[in-house]
Amino acid sequence: MGTQIMIVAFIEEIIFRGFMLNILISKGIRSAVLTSSLLFALTHSLQLLGGQSLETTILQITYAFFIGMVLSLLIVNQQSIIVAIVFHGLNNSLIIMGKDNDSSIYTYIIILLMIIYTVFLWIRALKFDGVMAIKSS
């Protein structure tokens, strides 16, 4: 199962942070991070086709959006894609372990933590973007 988790994390990170974020970054950091995160989240809506409840799917889309924000911002903040892959794999592992307790509170706590971390990384990315704009002037 660990290998499967890391393969999924690897593929998703290569697609969304490796290719997509890299292509969108020319439109600006804000646009690139938001667009790649939104598209990452929307791909998780496909769980509805597998019979997942609407409430669970909406929660998963929200969760995926903020995880996508954190992962995109890690890349924007000069982290290696390897860091994003490992973070993603560990996150997926925690989700699988958390499913055993049948409580959504775990997911809400993680979403709250991801929102806080997103704000921290966003501020850092905007400072870095401002520094880069000054250096290129």
Image (cartoon, rainbow, N blue to C red):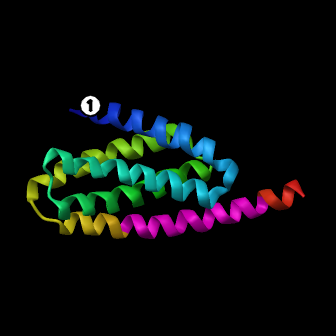
Q: Is residue 72 above or below residue 59?
A: above
Q: Between residues 20 and 68, which one lies in front from this camera angle?
A: 20
Image location (x, y in percent) of residue 118: 48, 64
Secondary structure type for disc 1: helix
Work out which quarter of the rendered image holds the C terminus and state it. Answer: bottom right
In the picture, measured across the screen, residue 132 lies left or right of residue 53, that is right
Q: Main secondary structure of the magenta part?
A: helix
Residue located 64% across and 57% down the image: 29
Mark 1, residue position? 4
Q: In this view, does 62 lie above or below 45?
A: below
Image location (x, y in percent) of residue 117: 46, 65
Work out which quarter of the rendered image holds the N terminus and state it. Answer: top left
Is 117 colored magenta in this rendering? Answer: yes
Residue located 38% across and 54% down the image: 41
Residue located 23% across and 51% down the image: 95
Check disc 1 and give the amino acid type: Gln
In the picture, measured across the screen, residue 8 lies left or right of residue 135, that is left
Q: Give the range drawn in magenta.
A: 113-131
Is 50 colored magenta in this rendering? Answer: no
Q: Is residue 127 above or below residue 1?
A: below
Q: Between residues 73 and 58, which one lies in front from this camera angle?
A: 58
Image location (x, y in percent) of residue 27: 67, 53
Residue located 69% across and 48% down the image: 26
Image location (x, y in percent) of residue 108: 26, 68
Q: Residue furthest front?
A: 49
Q: Residue furthest right?
A: 137
Residue 8: image quadrant is top left
**Neighbourhood count class around disc 1 (C-alpha, 10 Å): few under 14, some 14–19, many 20 upward:** few
Residue 80: image quadrant is top right
Q: In this view, does 129 lie above or below 81?
A: below
